[in-house]
Image (cartoon, rainbow, N blue to C red):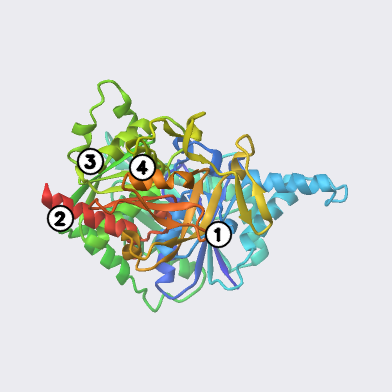
Amino acid sequence: MARFVFVTGGVVSSLGKGLLSASLAACLQARGYKCRIRKFDPYLNVDPGTMSPYQHGEVYVTDDGAETDLDLGHYERFTGVSARQSDNITTGRIYRDIIARERRGDYLGATVQVIPHVTNAIKEFALAETDDLDFVICEIGGTVGDIESLPFIEAIRQLRNDLGRGQTVSVHTTLVPWIKVAGELKTKPTQHSVREIASLGVQPDVLLCRCEMPIPEAERAKIAQFCNVPKSAVIEALDARSIYDVPLQYHREGLDDEVLKAFGMPTEPRPDLSRWERVMDAIDHPEGEVTIGVVGKYVGLPDAYKSLREALVHGGIANRVKVNIKWVDAELFEKPDGDTLSELEPMHAILVPGGFGERGTEGKIASVRFAKERKVPFFGICLGMQMACIEGARAAGVEGASSTEFGETNEPVVGMITEWMSEEGLQERRAGGDLGGTMRLGAYEATLGGNSHVAAIYGATQISERHRHRYEVNAHYRPALEKSGLVFSGMSPDGRLPEIVERPDHPWFVGVQFHPEYKSRPFDPHPLFASFIAAAVKQSRLV
């Protein structure tokens, strides 16, 4: 039977619960255990798919087409275990399903309440599909004391009671702030946070204390005494030099040992963390560095491109180079005084990521043109590929080339996906429909041209990649685009949908309709990112 670890947070948000969950799973995996991580999100949105990146960071997409929280990206990158729809639940989805059941009469006239109906739904989600697992790590979003998270805390209280002793452990993340003027670390916020969650019936077994300074022994003993945990279970969590050092750091501090002790399990044999040591060796001892210009519209919030940033780092690890990312606002190039040249000239490679909406697109097209003409390595992802195709069409004489996403156009080089074949048959998609229902989401296969650059990169002609888009390059423009030098080197298996374009006359110019960043791992970098950074290294030596 699977054992459950419940991860909660107190005092403030952004203490690193997702990173803690991923790192703990990595440490338990390194001991030979099979783990899965789940995220409970207290917000009322059904999923994060329609939320602004400024509000929530990036939307992560799983193989089975779920739009989920960015923490699931951490989970996959640290464990290598592909996440599923069933690994992320929101209050919105729970209430939607409960109300649908109530409308159907499934509750036989009973009064529908938070307890037991909502809490039962949360427990069912936690317990589903766990038979083949050793550990299930459940991260509760938000902070203790939030009204939104109360049903989740109550559900884990019930679960701890239902499953019995030795089957559950509670890990609570908290802040130990450094008061500069006093020159002291303060333990009171941690004490209050633990008191708050204990008052709700959940006594933490292990405390992860985020701090800027090492916690002195006296303060550690004080936290242990007032929070009712062993002193060894007060885990110090200083800022790490890289997120990939966190599993090693938390292991050194004894996190996985304390969790196993709390379960009454042996702490031997020691975990094999050699792959994390190899990753950190590549990060700590680079043999050079490159600068990548990322031309996007959410550049003010790097979390909007979290998976992308990490995939570029992985490409750096594969080539043992440090990757410096320069975030460039695409709208800069659309202003009358916008200087594409001065912004992009220092870059060793240019990447145009995905996005929605017209804002900043002309700036992205200008950066594609710059990369093409200056022979600078270029990588276009999702909207980035579409911008490369619009730029190519305009270069081929299709002056009004545009996307229907940006309004009516006589030359729709990019258009709305109108129909898809699914298991249920032909699915119609309409522009005015449900936003969540008009997307091509999840893993789809593609066939690569045998002599193409991308086939050489992948070392295969059949690939599967994750998609998240509503618009598609119009294959009717293929002859015009090929006339401008673009080659359609990857298509859907039926040959109808363009998946990859490239320029054979360019050192490295690739546009993909999918999101390869979702499948990149620090110990297994995605081949496209590894190749892109290798091209940037070559470019840096030419400059």
Q: Number of callouts in the render?
A: 4
**Circle nearer the N terminus (3, 2):** 2
**Circle nearer the N terminus (1, 3):** 1
Q: Which mark is residue 373?
A: 3
Amino acid type indicated by mark 2: Gly
Q: In which image quadrant can residue 20 be found?
A: bottom left
- Residue 199 or 439: which is nearer the viewer? 439
Would residue 45 appear left or right of 483 to someone viewing this image? right
Q: Are marks 1 and 2 in contact (CB under 8 Å)?
A: no
Would residue 18 appear left or right of 181 to someone viewing this image? right
Residue that mark 4 sits on: 388
Q: Are marks 1 and 3 in contact (CB under 8 Å)?
A: no
Residue that mark 2 sits on: 288
When the figure is inspected, residue 278 is found, relative to residue 429, above or below; the finding is below
Q: Residue furthest right?
A: 109
**Circle nearer the N terminus (1, 2):** 1
**Circle nearer the N terminus (4, 1):** 1
* SS label for mark 4: helix
